[in-house]
Amino acid sequence: MPLNGWWRPGLLCLVLVTSSCGSIPTDSDEAGSESNDRTYVDENWGFQIDIPDSSTWGYSAQTSTQDRLANGLPRTEVRITQVPGEGSNFWPSLLLQANALDGDETVESFAQGVELYYKATYMGYQPEAKRYYQVAGAEVAEWLFTTVRIRTRGDRYMAAVVKDNRKGYLLLGSGLGSVFPLENYREMVSSMKFR
């Protein structure tokens, strides 16, 4: 099932190239919920996500104000990255991408569309069973998968799709060997809030 053009071949890349970047929203008062300097707040999409410990995690966000999705909101991506541990040069990261959903889209159909893309994109894609739960009233489907090892991208992943009304969020956390901060990824997904 196409997802409003978001999954066109070559479009889902690890770095979103934009022709115009907007500012990173950080004023939590307008989001209507508590946050701190380790919370990313997106005013356009109306979500926030907590960033882990600042001594090991950093984040960046890109908003393309000239590239609008079907709901009129700008294409948005947040990357949360962990500094490599001693003896490693792999940077685990969680990539969050916002997406417009069709009115009849369910969390299950959203997850199926994403999984079809992963099967076509990741060599040796081997998924585990999905688990379903809720975060701040939004529906979540999460699953782990492994792939053929690619040094810069990893070989194990946590995928989560979050459906908040007609807004969808895809979160993809990467790992390589024993460098796979799964609990941090799950904590970040669980920290999400919506307005």
Image: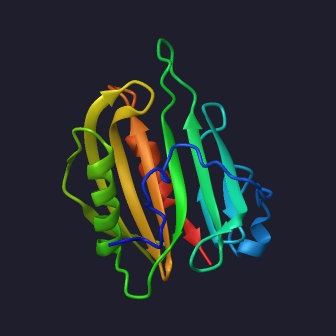
Name the residue located 71 percent from the left edge and 76 percent from the top edge: 32
* Residue sitting nearer the eye, 62 or 7: 7
Q: Quadrant of residue 193?
A: bottom right
Q: Quadrant of the C terminus?
A: bottom right
In this view, 88 is above or below 21: above
- Residue 35 visible to an observer of this rendering: no
* Residue sitting nearer the eye, 105 or 120: 120
**Residue farthest to the top, as pictured:** 87
* Residue sitting nearer the eye, 152 or 173: 152
* Image location (x, y in percent) of residue 60: 67, 45
**Residue farthest to the front, as pictured:** 9
Q: Quadrant of residue 83?
A: top right
* Image location (x, y in percent) of residue 139: 39, 74
Name the residue located 47 percent from the left edge and 11 percent from the top edge: 87
Name the residue located 38 percent from the left edge and 31 percent from the top edge: 154
- Residue 1 visible to an observer of this rendering: yes
Name the residue located 69 percent from the left edge and 52 percent from the top edge: 18
* Image location (x, y in percent) of residue 163: 44, 74
| Count of marks placed on residues | 0
